[in-house]
């Protein structure tokens, strides 16, 4: 990937210029739909944007116990990692990406949860620590099927390059692997019934309880980008770019990503929160089953 | 232009923190009612937050008892600027039937600056929403630290 193309992917599409409005739209749609499902009118779609602007304009209360530099660096790292992950998505056909970018993508997708865990502990709050512990346990349990599914795709496609992998993997492997990733999606987005780490009304806001002003705004941004990156990954793997028209490929990525929001919201609105043991058990049963099936089929159909 | 955007954002995204300073639970029930489908204040961008650090509006119910005063002062200090304080019900405004009791440290404005009073025992959800809307007006135009007084 040439430097100019990489910069374009990072800043324009599928990077920040696309992902920021898309992330706010997704979060807005999620809140609106959840309200409609509960028989309310709900906030306007622009609500997440105004929330972030308001939070950025607040003056944080200085605290002695927590390290301000650490609390600033962690959300910045999370936002940066998510922007990088977005830039690696095989959104458009052509010469984008490089050999091994799947590994980089996995690393970048895993950074924000890790930062969240550290922020929870760094905030020196009991709610933050409980939330961070839960986040750690859930993300370990969730990553087993998630990584196994990606591994199956890479084995069957015979490559670690996302672009080729999205185009070449046979559907006998891709279907169970996508199913496993889809089942992991609400867990990674911390939606009900898997909203353990940010369990509102139970442990306040989990790792983010003690964060205010711009720190909270950056975390909201990271969460919005997380939505775009994870739904975008499913969209790019489920509907790989055809290469006929860049505009059409981009529109399709956006449309498929947006289409994932209503079912995820419905799941969140219709269910209550599970306990930690139930979540891990569920994760190690159903998504892992799908991922293992994908790995087995991938070994069978692998190119010599 | 940036200031106008911030003002607009503050008007559309007020997050509340609710503190019970010894209330009988009457006002608390009425406040939570505002979030129900019938009143649905979320359509104004209003959210009830669990952490005072996330909040813009501090809603206090109850006459401020001796036991709750330290918590009130702590929580008020944790709200980042700009912030507004809404006294919900007659208790934080005057002490109500508890006025004169040795266990009462209120009324609320003796301890923290109050911006809006919503009288009633308990006030109706409509009155609470109106009070919060007034508080949001104050919040949007507030330039620097400090209470209304």
Image (spheres, rainbow, N blue to C red):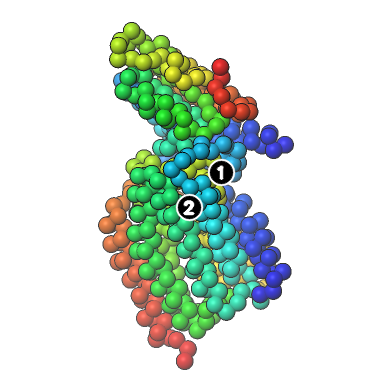
Q: Nearer the viewer, residue A16 or A133?
A: A133
Front: mark 1 or 2: 1
Q: Residue at x 39, y 15 (%)?
A: B106
Q: Which mark is residue A112?
A: none
Q: Residue at x 39, y 86 (%)?
A: A300
Disc 1 secondary structure class? helix
What chain letter is assigned to the residue under label 2?
A
Q: Position of residue A78 (x, y in %)?
A: 52, 57
Q: Are marks 1 and 2 on the same chain?
A: yes
Q: Residue at x 46, y 33 (%)?
A: B78
How packed mark 2 is, by other alpha carbons closer than 10 Å (few <14, some 14-19, many 20 or more), is: some
Q: Which residue is mark 1?
A: A214
Q: Earlier in the sequence, mark 1 or mark 2?
A: 1
Quick check: A246 left or right of B149?
Answer: right
Q: Position of residue A104 (x, y in %)?
A: 53, 71
Which residue in the rendered view is the most extreme toward the bottom?
A304
Q: Pointer 1 and pointer 2: residues touching (CB < 8 Å)?
A: no
Q: Can you say which quadrant of the picture contains the N terminus of chain A?
A: bottom right
Q: Nearer the viewer, residue B139 or A145?
A: B139
Q: Which mark is residue A262?
A: 2
Q: Position of residue B95 (x, y in %)?
A: 37, 12
What chain letter is assigned to the residue under label 1?
A
Above or below, A16 against A167 in this view is above
Distance Cα–Cα, label 1 vs label 2: 29 Å
Q: Position of residue A7 (x, y in %)?
A: 68, 65
Above or below, A33 against B64 in this view is below
Above or below, B133 against A93 in this view is above
Which residue in the rendered view is the most extreme toward the front?
A64
Q: Nearer the viewer, residue B79 or A51?
A: B79
Quick check: A227 left or right of A275?
Answer: right
């Amino acid at each position: 990937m040439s430097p100019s193309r990489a910069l374009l992917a990072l800043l324009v599409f599928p990077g920040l210029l696309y992902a920021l409005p898309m992330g706010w739209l997704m979060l807005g749609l999620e809140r609106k739909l959840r309200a409609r499902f509960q028989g309310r009118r709900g906030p306007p779609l622009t609500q997440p944007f105004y929330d972030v602007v308001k939070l950025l304009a607040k003056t944080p209360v200085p605290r002695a116990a927590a390290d301000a530099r650490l609390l600033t660096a962690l959300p910045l790292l999370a936002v940066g990692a998510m922007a990088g992950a977005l830039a690696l998505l095989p959104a458009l056909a052509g010469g984008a990406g490089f050999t091994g970018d799947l590994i980089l993508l996995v690393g970048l997708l895993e950074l924000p949860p890790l930062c969240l865990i550290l922020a929870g502990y760094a905030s020196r709050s009991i709610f933050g620590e409980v939330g961070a512990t839960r986040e750690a346990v859930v993300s370990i349990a969730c990553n087993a099927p998630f990584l196994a599914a990606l591994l199956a795709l890479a084995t069957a496609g015979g490559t670690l390059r996302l672009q080729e992998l999205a185009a070449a993997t046979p559907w006998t492997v891709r279907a169970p692997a996508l199913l496993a990733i889809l089942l992991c999606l609400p867990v990674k987005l911390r939606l009900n019934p898997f909203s353990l780490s940010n369990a509102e009304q139970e442990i306040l806001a989990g790792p983010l309880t003690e964060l205010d002003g711009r720190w909270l705004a950056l975390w909201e941004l990271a969460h919005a980008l997380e939505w775009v990156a994870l739904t975008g990954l499913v969209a790019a793997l489920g509907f790989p770019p055809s290469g006929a028209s860049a505009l059409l490929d981009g529109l399709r990525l956006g449309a498929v990503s947006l289409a994932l929001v209503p079912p995820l919201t419905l799941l969140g609105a219709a269910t209550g929160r599970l306990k930690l043991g139930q979540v891990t058990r569920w994760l190690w049963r159903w998504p892992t089953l799908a991922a293992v099936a994908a790995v087995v089929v991938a070994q069978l159909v692998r190119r010599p | 232009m940036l200031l106008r955007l911030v003002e607009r954002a503050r008007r559309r995204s007020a997050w509340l923190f609710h503190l019970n300073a010894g209330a009988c639970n009457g006002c608390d029930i009425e406040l939570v009612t505002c979030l129900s489908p019938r009143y649905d204040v979320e359509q104004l961008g209003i959210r009830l937050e669990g952490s005072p650090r996330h909040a813009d509006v501090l809603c206090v119910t109850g006459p401020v008892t001796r036991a709750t005063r330290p918590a009130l002062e702590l929580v008020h200090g944790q709200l980042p600027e700009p912030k507004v304080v809404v006294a919900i019900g007659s208790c934080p405004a005057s002490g109500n039937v508890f006025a004169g009791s040795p266990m009462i440290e209120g009324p609320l404005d003796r301890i923290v600056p109050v911006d809006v009073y919503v009288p009633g025992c308990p006030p109706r959800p409509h009155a609470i929403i109106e009070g919060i809307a007034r508080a949001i007006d104050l919040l949007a135009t507030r330039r620097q630290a400090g209470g209304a007084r």
